[in-house]
Image (spheres, rainbow, N blue to C red):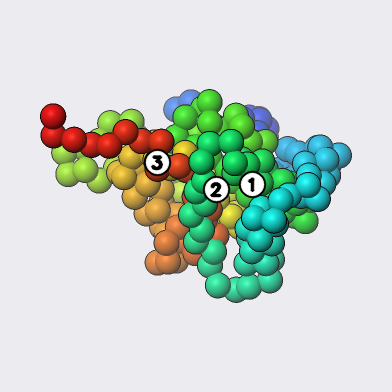
Amino acid sequence: FLLEDINRLLFNERMCLSDLGLPELQDVNIDVVAEERARYNTQHLQYEAAKMLTFNAEQNIVGAHILQQITSVTDQLKLFLTAKAGRGKTFLINSVIAHLRLHNYIAIVCAPSAVAATNYEGGITAHKACRIPLETPQDGKKVSTLSGTSLQAELLRKAHVIVIDEISMLKREDFDCMNRLLCDLRKDPRPFGGCHIIILGDLAQLAPVVEE
């Protein structure tokens, strides 16, 4: 029971037993969905979700499309959302994700950097969410170190939608690593294991690549 309690505490910090050199438990009596839902304050989610009432016309279109695809349509949502800085991308996603969480959907929001991840309730770095190695092997194919029996792995199996912000900062090898991990965990060959995927970023913020 001690390891189970430690496992639960670590999960709330997005950590695993294996991160501490401990073996992952095989038969876990922990409901990861219930634990994930308990992370968020209902009143705060209601406050954030209510901001959808202040959406402009474009935000209303995008927000309605996301909610319809996730809650009503069986097809996988694969959305790339881009706009200039300050146009309300983060504001929109925070409100939509709060609405989904209020209705018991599991949403994982991540970004390449901790600074970008802190813009979201429950945000986490992509490397921590999927245990992406920092070093790239010679063949360029990174392999996640996440244990398939960990609570974090189970959360990824149960997730309804994954959001990746600042996509222009994420290396191709890291993106591929996340994709393969989700496909393996969810036993689904579709992109990201069939999980709804929302990608945000402004590629125009990147400087052009020139020879000189």
Q: Secondary structure at mark 1?
A: helix
Q: Are marks 3 and 2 in contact (CB under 8 Å)?
A: no
Residue 20 percent across, percent down from the top left: 48, 26
Q: Nearer the viewer, mark 3 or mark 2?
A: 3
Q: What amino acid is labelled 2 in the image?
A: Val
Q: What's the mark number on residue 93?
A: 1
Distance Cα–Cα, label 3 vs label 2: 20 Å
Residue under the point 64% across and 64% down: 65
Q: Is residue 16 visible?
A: no
Label 2 – label 1 distance at C-alpha:
9 Å
Q: Which element carries disc 2, helix, strand or loop?
A: strand
Dot 2 alpha-carbon crowd within 10 angstroms: few under 14, some 14 to 19, many 20 or more: many
Q: Is residue 98 above or below residue 115?
A: below
Circles 2, 1 touching at the beta carbon (< 8 Å): yes
Q: Residues within 10 Å of mark 1 (few under 14, many from 20)?
A: many
Could you say where residue 198 lies in the image, as x and y percent from the top left?
Answer: 53, 53
Judging by the rendered image, the residue that carries numbered circle 2 is 163
Q: Is residue 138 left or right of residue 160?
A: left
Q: Nearer the viewer, mark 2 or mark 1?
A: 1
- Which residue in the protein does label 3 denote? 204
Q: Residue furthest bottom?
A: 74
Residue 132, labelled with which disc?
Answer: none
